[in-house]
Image (cartoon, rainbow, N blue to C red):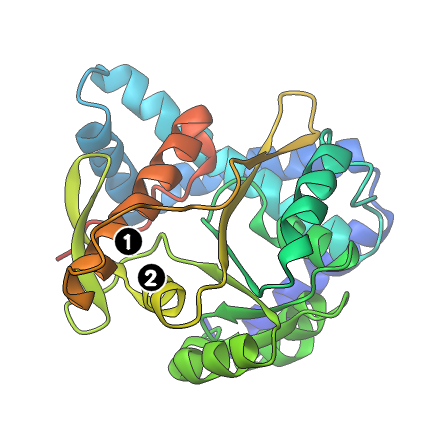
């Protein structure tokens, strides 16, 4: 699709979300989720393949229904993001356990260490980033630069930086992370997408081999920030719940070589991610080829 047309289409949906009743918007995007499940054959097949491998105990019909739910859940997330863009979405009110999470963060923050908030493409990760920044924990957020620069610089980046977060791109991620940690600032990063042998380590996710980025583990070993895996899932009533275990500590022998420590830490983070995703598997991004090696 032409970049200008794509940009105009996104602007149309942003405009539509300004005045359309929320219930209508949600019905529209639910229908779009089902529509895209049927027309995006490649994405549908990737989701079904990934779910089949991750849940071998499920039969074909259950896998197909879960894949379809994945598309509609993603569409619901997009609808909520459109409402966020238009400031028609109460961030703190939408999160059931907001006070509990903020109390936990306040206790951890007494150490005055930088925090690496690490999460996944799960639930509504954009809402999570807004919630954290809005409540006193702005971050340098590491993300992929969108392929459509009109959307990236006119919509995505301003939206992500609305409450004090700084949006930076993966191309220079390590430099930005080092700078933030040296300045006692926080970082937000998603590490659930595929990596390669150059910037990742071999690990497992849902028991399946995959490369996972080593950036968080390396920063942990060099600068000792708080590493907080934190996730946000949508409940059946449309509200959200933050899943937050606390600091992701791992004990190991200090005499181990750094490469081994990085591998152990990265696997530890993957295991935490998996526990979160299993709570609401339809809300993770199964249509991405996570296990490509």
In depth, the one of 75 and 187 nearer the eye is: 187
CA gap, disc 1 to disc 2? 6 Å
Which label was assigned to residue 287? none
Relative side of 24 to 67, left or right: right
Place of residue 240 in the rendered image (x, y in percent of width and height, measured from the top left)? 66, 33
Which residue is located at x 14 percent, y 65 percent? 257
Place of residue 171 in the rendered image (x, y in percent of width and height, measured from the top left)? 39, 82
Residue 151: which quarter of the image?
Answer: bottom right
Which residue is located at x 34 percent, y 41 percent? 286
- Residue named by callout 1: 266
- For residue 75, above or below residue 199: above
Which quarter shows the C terminus?
A: bottom left
In depth, the one of 276 and 74 nearer the eye is: 276
Q: Earlier in the sequence, mark 1 or mark 2?
A: 2
Residue 211: which quarter of the image?
Answer: bottom left
- Residue named by callout 2: 217
Relative side of 209 to 11, left or right: left
Place of residue 49 in the rendered image (x, y in percent of width and height, measured from the top left)? 20, 36
Which residue is located at x 72 percent, y 51 percent? 131
**Secondary element at tag 1:** helix
Residue 50: tell me if it is visible.
yes
Which quarter shows the N terminus?
A: bottom left
**Secondary element at tag 2:** helix
- For residue 149, above or below residue 74: below
- For residue 214, above or below residue 65: below
In depth, the one of 245 and 211 nearer the eye is: 245
- Mark 2 closeness class: few <14, some 14–19, many ≥20 residues within 10 Å: many
Pointers 1 and 2 in contact (C-beta within 8 Å): yes
- For residue 180, above or below residue 91: below
Place of residue 185 in the rendered image (x, y in percent of width and height, measured from the top left)? 62, 72
């Amino acid at each position: 699709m032409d970049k200008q047309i794509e940009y105009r289409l996104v602007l149309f949906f942003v405009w539509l979300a300004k005045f359309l009743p929320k219930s209508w918007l949600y019905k529209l995007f639910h229908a779009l989720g089902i529509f895209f499940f049927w027309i995006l054959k490649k994405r549908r097949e990737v989701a079904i393949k990934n779910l089949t491998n991750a849940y071998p105990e499920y039969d074909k019909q259950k896998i197909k229904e879960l894949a379809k739910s994945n598309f509609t859940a993603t569409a619901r997330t997009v609808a909520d993001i459109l409402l966020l863009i238009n400031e028609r979405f109460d961030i703190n009110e939408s999160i059931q356990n907001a006070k509990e999470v903020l109390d936990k963060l306040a206790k951890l923050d007494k150490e005055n260490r930088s925090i690496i908030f690490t999460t996944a493409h799960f639930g509504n990760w954009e809402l999570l980033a807004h919630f954290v920044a809005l409540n006193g924990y702005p971050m340098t957020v590491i993300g992929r630069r969108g392929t459509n620069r009109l959307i990236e610089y006119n919509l995505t980046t301003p939206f992500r930086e609305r409450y004090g977060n700084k949006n930076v791109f993966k191309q220079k991620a390590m430099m930005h992370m080092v700078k933030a940690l040296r300045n006692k600032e926080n970082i937000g990063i998603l590490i659930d997408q595929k990596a390669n042998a150059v910037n990742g380590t071999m690990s497992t996710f849902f028991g399946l081999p995959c490369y996972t980025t080593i950036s968080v583990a390396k920063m942990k070993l060099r600068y000792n920030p708080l590493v907080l895996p934190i996730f946000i899932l949508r409940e059946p009533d449309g509200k959200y719940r933050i899943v937050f275990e606390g600091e992701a500590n791992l004990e190991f022998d200090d005499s181990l070589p750094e490469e081994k420590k990085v591998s152990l830490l990265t696997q530890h983070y993957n295991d935490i991610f998996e526990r979160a995703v299993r709570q609401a598997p339809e809300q993770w991004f199964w249509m991405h080829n996570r296990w490509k090696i």
